[in-house]
């Protein structure tokens, strides 16, 4: 049974993109450090190169991470593998709206998903997020490719696959039926309808209804912590699904979206624990782990 889906006394601590306070996000160095720290799980992001290789990378454009002006899918794996993630890395804005730059000891290379699974999948659980690109909504092949890589690594019961794009999840399950997949909710998803409704309240109701899991046939859901209340967790669990949340103690927001102040508080950690969520993602998983021990 996939540990993400089983009942648990405390939420699983998930290092968001590894351990970004110590190593650049989505790097082998960060994932190996997560193992050394005894973290139970990590989260990572997957995109496709021009030659359809699954790489672990958050941004579609490479400027922030590497200084290159190319997009990930402009380059082949051979070309992308020559780039390095910079030592002084912009992390967006903090909870006060100030620019954040993280400083690391050395540059790091971009890894293939297959490399990461070979290195750490036997040692930590992994939430694999298939990234959504609004400009290329028709492209769903990443679901096939990621599912194939996971199956090749024999890691089906050590990972979950999540996305804000349900079609990518559908492609992944069609390729590998044993995968546990789940749709992700962001608290800004319905902001376009703000004149007509309260976006957060409506998203919370959708979560509580378990409508998306029933519609997609999925077994788990990932949601912004601001959307989760007592009824949310209770009803998702009653339907036999698991629910996890993101992202506490964030280093910064690279999308420009304001950081909710509650995400920086221990009070919010305790609230989520009391609600019974199944996992919590954090940019500072060491701090989160200490609070749960």
Image (cartoon, helix red, strand yellow):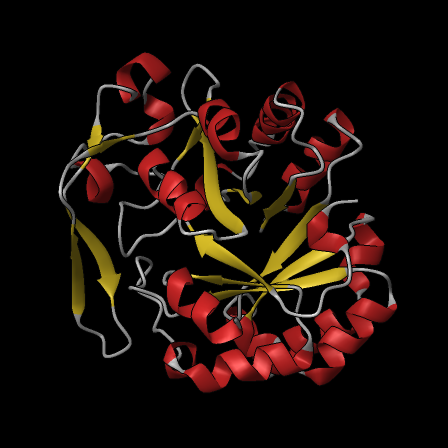
Residue sitting nearer the eye, 124 or 63: 124
250 displayed left or right of 211: left
| Vertical relation: 19 (above or below) 251 | above
| Vertical relation: 239 (above or below) 140 | below
Write the residue at 54% across / 43% down.
124
For the N terminus, the image quarter is: top right
Write the residue at 51% across / 24% down.
118
Write the residue at 53% across / 77% down.
226
Residue sitting nearer the eye, 202 or 94: 94
Residue sitting nearer the eye, 11 or 24: 11
Confirm whether residue 196 shows in the render.
no
43 displayed left or right of 261: right
Q: Quadrant of residue 80?
A: top left
Confirm whether residue 231 shows in the render.
yes
* Number of callouts: 0
Write the residue at 44% across / 44% down.
35
209 displayed left or right of 143: right
How far across and how far down the image is residue 90, in percent?
A: 19, 53
Q: Quadrant of residue 91?
A: bottom left
How far across and how far down the image is residue 213, in percent?
A: 79, 56
How far across and how far down the image is residue 43, in percent?
A: 49, 48
How far across and how far down the image is residue 40, in percent?
A: 54, 52
Q: Quadrant of residue 135?
A: top left
């Amino acid at each position: 049974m996939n540990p993400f889906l089983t009942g648990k006394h405390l939420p699983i601590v998930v290092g968001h993109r590894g351990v970004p306070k110590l190593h650049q996000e989505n790097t082998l160095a960060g994932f190996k450090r997560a193992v050394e720290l005894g973290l139970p799980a990590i989260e990572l992001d997957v995109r496709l190169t021009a030659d359809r290789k699954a790489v672990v990378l958050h941004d579609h454009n490479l400027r922030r991470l590497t200084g290159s002006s190319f997009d990930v899918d402009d380059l082949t794996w051979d070309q992308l593998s020559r780039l390095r993630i910079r030592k002084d890395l912009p992390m967006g804005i903090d909870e006060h709206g100030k620019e954040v730059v993280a400083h690391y000891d050395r540059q790091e290379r971009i890894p293939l998903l297959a490399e990461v699974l070979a290195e750490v999948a036997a040692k930590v659980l992994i939430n694999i997020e298939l990234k959504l690109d609004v400009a290329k909504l028709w492209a769903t092949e990443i679901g096939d490719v990621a599912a194939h890589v996971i199956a090749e690594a024999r890691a089906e019961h050590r990972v979950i696959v999540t996305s804000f794009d349900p079609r990518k999840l559908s492609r992944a399950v069609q390729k590998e039926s044993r995968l546990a997949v789940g749709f992700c909710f962001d608290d800004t998803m319905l902001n376009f309808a703000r004149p007509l409704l309260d976006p957060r309240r409506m998203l919370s109701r959708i979560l509580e209804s378990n409508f998306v899991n029933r519609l997609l046939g999925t077994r788990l859901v990932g949601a912004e912590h601001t959307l989760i209340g007592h009824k949310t967790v209770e009803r998702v669990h009653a339907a036999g699904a698991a629910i996890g949340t993101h992202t506490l103690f964030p280093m910064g927001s690279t999308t420009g979206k304001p950081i909710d102040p509650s995400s920086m508080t221990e009070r919010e950690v305790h609230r989520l624990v009391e609600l019974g969520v199944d996992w919590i993602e954090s940019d500072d998983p060491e701090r989160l782990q200490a609070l749960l021990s």
